[in-house]
Image (cartoon, grey):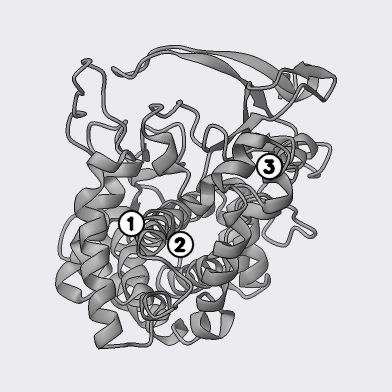
Amino acid sequence: RILRDHHPVAWQDESAVLGWPAGPGFWAVTRHADVVRVLKDAATYSSYLGATQIRDPAPDDLPFIRRMMLNQDPATAAAATTAASTAGGGDHGRLRRLVSRAFTPRLVERFEARVRDRARTLLASALEQARTGDGTFDVVTAVTDDYALLNLADLLGVPPADRGLLLHWTQRVIGYQDPDEAPPPVLGPDGEPVNPRSPAMLADMFAYARTLAAHKRDHPGDDILTILARDPELTAPEMEMFFFLLTVAGNDTVRSAAPGGLLALAENPGEYERLRAGRVDAGTAVDELLRRHPPVLSFRRTAVRDTVLAGTRVAAGDKVVVFHASAHHDERVFTDPHRLDLSRSPNPHVAFGEGPHVCLGAHFARLQLRVFHEEVARALPALRLAAPPRRLVSHFINGLKSVRVEVPA
């Protein structure tokens, strides 16, 4: 709150952390209006110039990273800089239209029965194990890790035997800062850690994507990858990048938000009782839980030109980092923001982003989260924590490694 009230755009030094080298520093943006402005104004705050992670990518990796839609700018914004325009930053709109044709609400909604059955099955198994054990279970390891992973695998059309690969790749790319999630970093010739998003570290994922795409062309299914693999406008490298984006973002969004929402409910038993009693719409509740526990902590942009943000001069080339959780607690937008109110409306959270990069998979994520919380409310008459939660070490993902709850006798 101190930053929001007095330093809404504040310079942050970028120290070396866990073996990762120091950086040049960045502007931290903490007010809701300024976060939305940065996310919407791609002509001033580029995803393309330096990609979207706080840490600068290696210069040799940047052309590869820019092939991902997440790290591109819309055509109108790309034209704002010669570098972005010349290098094809304007591909963003074309790629977004292509994947939108596959990611339709109608296709996603066909998965609801399967998603609900999975939630019930995983919860029933966790409850049974708890009742024959110590009376507790870990929501993350017993339910939400598999729930998010298997739902995504169904949507993508990944064969059952290969589904563990999705979790392995997600942990490697997202959890690389956490020693519990990933092995020690691979060091390059200069002795510095190699970015897990660099092409050298993703060769196995891309090889798998090529093999699976070829299989889908010959054996089509009712899934996203079949649609993308058979789209003549999508090149093979673009297909591989979509697989990377969907595998990592599609898995970890729900994998983080589901236990985060449950944790918020456990800490607010009165609101959980309202949800169980049907006194609040589950969809509205999901929005409030996303406000309380957004799956993404931060996104980076790079200033295209000298500009002024919230009265602060930002120079061309400066890193500008928005912080979602701070925006979600901005008293200028949310009444009593520290109170969980499952019926809060309107609720302009930015958990799925804003502007040209708003999450294409938001509909599927909302469906999964709504079904998950409906089934938890059906299965558990009360939510009580059995141990303090354990959080993922990450500056990017608001992940949870453990949320252990008691099972009423």
Mark pair 1, 3: CA separation: 25 Å
Which residue in the protein does label 3 denote? 328
Could you say which is closer to the camera, residue 264 or residue 185?
185
Q: Residues within 10 Å of mark 2 (few under 14, many from 20)?
A: some
Q: Position of residue 353 (x, y in %)?
A: 63, 50
Q: Position of residue 145 (x, y in %)?
A: 31, 58
Disc with the residue nearer the chain's start (2 vs 1): 1
Up-down relation of residue 240 to residue 263 (above or below)? below
Disc with the residue nearer the chain's start (3 vs 2): 3
Name the residue type under label 3: His
Which residue in the protein does label 1 denote? 139
Name the residue type under label 1: Val
> Mark 3 or 2, which is nearer the eye?
3
Pointers 2 and 1 in contact (C-beta within 8 Å) = no
Q: Position of residue 1 (x, y in %)?
A: 71, 25
Name the residue type under label 2: Ala
Up-down relation of residue 322 to residue 107 (above or below)? above
Q: Residue at x 33, y 87 (%)?
A: 221
Helix, strand or loop under label 1: helix
Q: Which mark is residue 382?
A: 2
